[in-house]
Image (cartoon, grey):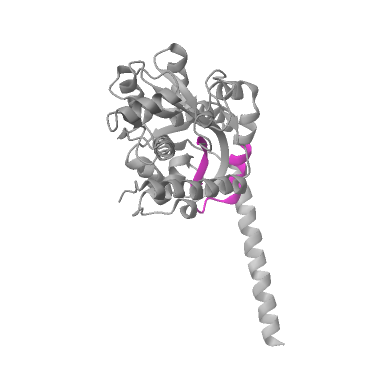
Amino acid sequence: MHSFKMALTSKIACGVALAACCLAGNALAADYPTRAIRWIVPYVPGGTTDIVARIMAQRLSERLKQTIVVDNRPGAGNNIGAEVAVKAAPDGYTWFFVNPANAINATFYTNLRFNFLRDLAPVAGLIRVPNVMTVTRKLPAKNVPEFIAYAKANPGKLNFCSGGAGTSVHLSGELFKAMTGINMVHVPYKGSAPAVIDLISGQNHVIFDNMPGIIGFIRNGDIRALAVTTAKRSTQLPDVPSVSETVPGYEASAWFGVAVPKGTPAAIVDRINREVNETLKEQKVWARLADLGGTSIASSPAEFWRLHTMETEKWAKVVKASGVQLQ
């Protein structure tokens, strides 16, 4: 009887503690945020992640009535920025801009000092966009079949650039190489913006860049789009075929979202999730994102993490098949 009373007392105490934590978390969420928020973007300014983050940050700052500072932390294929986020205080004042590299890097790097899915907490999905296979106008190829023929006639002489080793831009190129049997040299940059500049000049020959970062250059005629990497054509570039029309089964895309350090109070996570999802519904915001080729992946935290997990498994197969792992 005595042990039963002790167990019952313990359960009641735990219940009271849990209720107190929930009430404290709800109180925090009600006041949150009371100061500026740092949103870590692990690339240089001007690329796709930076563009999308700044569109969202501008409106979210207005909704939350606090400044959201976009903190660009490029380097080490995204891992510098990710590690800063992992080590940050779990108080809701540090956000991380999640992108495909975080799923790819789980396999691409063999000695990471963190586990992304374990050490960060999901908040919300943002958008999914195609990558675009785009070439310098100095290259004679006008379509994918001509590009493949040219590459096979010039093995190892074409540079395919990316915004960094292990990014979706890089792995989209590796997947294309593997499925077509061509030989190209990968040239990584610390972001897609400088890579595209060298593509325009002809120093590089092809990039599989995220649509938001490159569509302006395509529309201006600075470079030539050969294909989109999604299974279907994009409404933003309706005359541009998909790679799969020439290479059956080829598919790749970029997707973005928000995560916070593990241990951030659930009530704050839910508040950020709600604000992000409501922002994505706003016509003015969505018109800008849709013009960049985006489709919404607004979601609950759990739904967004399921997407991240599936993408981690998908790209692990590509990384292992290509043999492009780094220490």
Q: Residue furthest top?
A: 220
Please tell me which residue lies in front, 164 or 324: 324
**Rendering coords of residue 263 (x, y %):** 51, 54
Across and down, in percent, residue 92 comes to 51, 44
Compared with 204, 185 (above or below) is below
* Residue 77 position in % (x across, y down): 35, 41
Q: Nearer the viewer, residue 92 or 327?
A: 327
| 195 on left or right of 317 | left
Quick check: can you spot residue 59? yes
- Where on the picture, by quarter, is residue 277? top right
Residue located 38% across and 34% down the image: 43
Q: Is residue 46 visible?
A: no
Vertical relation: 129 (above or below) 272: above
Answer whether residue 207 is magenta in the image: no
**Viewer-proximal residue among 203 and 155:** 155
| Numbered range of the magenta stretch | 252-275
7 to the left or right of 168: right
Q: Residue at x 35, y 48 (%)?
A: 323
Q: Nearer the viewer, residue 198 or 53?
A: 198
Quadrant of the frame with the N terminus: bottom right
Picture coordinates of residue 64 (x, y %)? 57, 33
